[in-house]
């Protein structure tokens, strides 16, 4: 927990105001993250990620992303996936949240919290955009054969 708190403090200093974060939880087997350094590194439980960071899971692996410490929802990234938080912000004036997630390949199971006002929660793939107002859903992207 101390590692996660220190990481959150240092990472949020890099983010612009209003940007929210994700916490990686329960990594199983080979899960990797590419942050601002541009290098892939093994995920540790409690790592903090910001929009633009990428998460990659190998076969027989998975990890959860707790959006804003699970206040907005959580995403379980299944094996063989490439995932990114595109945008995760809150408007200081209106309180509206914008959460945009990208899935290049693989599968995610999303537990989105109920949205208020003009808030948005969307998952984008190369061929589709899914928007929700608060539900559990799954998105799968398969390789072209």
Image (cartoon, rainbow, N blue to C red):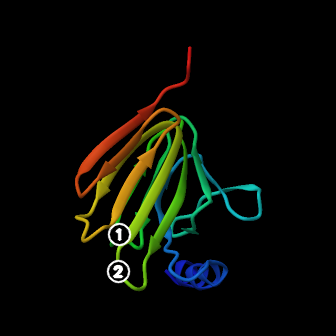
Q: Seen from this angle, which residue lies furthest top?
A: 145
Left or right relative to 101: residue 96: left
Q: Position of residue 28 (x, y in %)?
A: 49, 50
- Quote the CA–CA distance across marks 2 and 1: 17 Å
Mark number displayed over residue 85: none
Q: Is residue 138 left or right of residue 51?
A: left
Label 1, residues with CA under 10 Å away: few <14, some 14-19, many ≥20: some
N-term mark: 2 or 1 = 1
| Residue at mark 2 | 95
Question: In front: 80, or 97?
Answer: 97
Seen at 35% across and 74% down, the residue is 96
Q: Residues within 10 Å of mark 2 (few under 14, many from 20)?
A: some
Pinpoint residue 50: horizontal percent, then vertical percent. Answer: 57, 67
Looking at the rendering, in which quadrant would you find the C terminus? top right
Residue 30: x %, y % from top left: 59, 46
Image quarter of residue 70: bottom left
Residue drawn at x 68%, y 62% is: 35
> Would you place residue 68 above or below residue 5 in this image?
above
Badge 1 is on which residue? 70
């Amino acid at each position: 927990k101390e590692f996660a708190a220190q990481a959150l403090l240092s990472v949020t200093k890099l983010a612009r105001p209003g940007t929210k974060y994700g916490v990686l939880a329960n990594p199983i087997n080979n899960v990797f993250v590419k942050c601002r350094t541009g290098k892939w590194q093994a995920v540790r439980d409690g790592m903090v990620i910001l929009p633009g960071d990428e998460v990659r899971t190998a076969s027989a692996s998975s990890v959860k992303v707790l959006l804003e410490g699970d206040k907005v929802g959580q995403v379980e990234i299944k094996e063989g996936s490439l995932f990114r938080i595109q945008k995760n912000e809150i408007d200081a004036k209106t309180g509206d949240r914008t959460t945009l997630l990208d899935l290049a390949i693989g599968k995610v199971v999303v537990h989105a919290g109920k949205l208020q006002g003009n808030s948005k929660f969307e998952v984008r793939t190369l061929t589709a955009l899914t928007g929700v107002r608060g539900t559990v859903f799954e998105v799968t992207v398969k390789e072209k054969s």
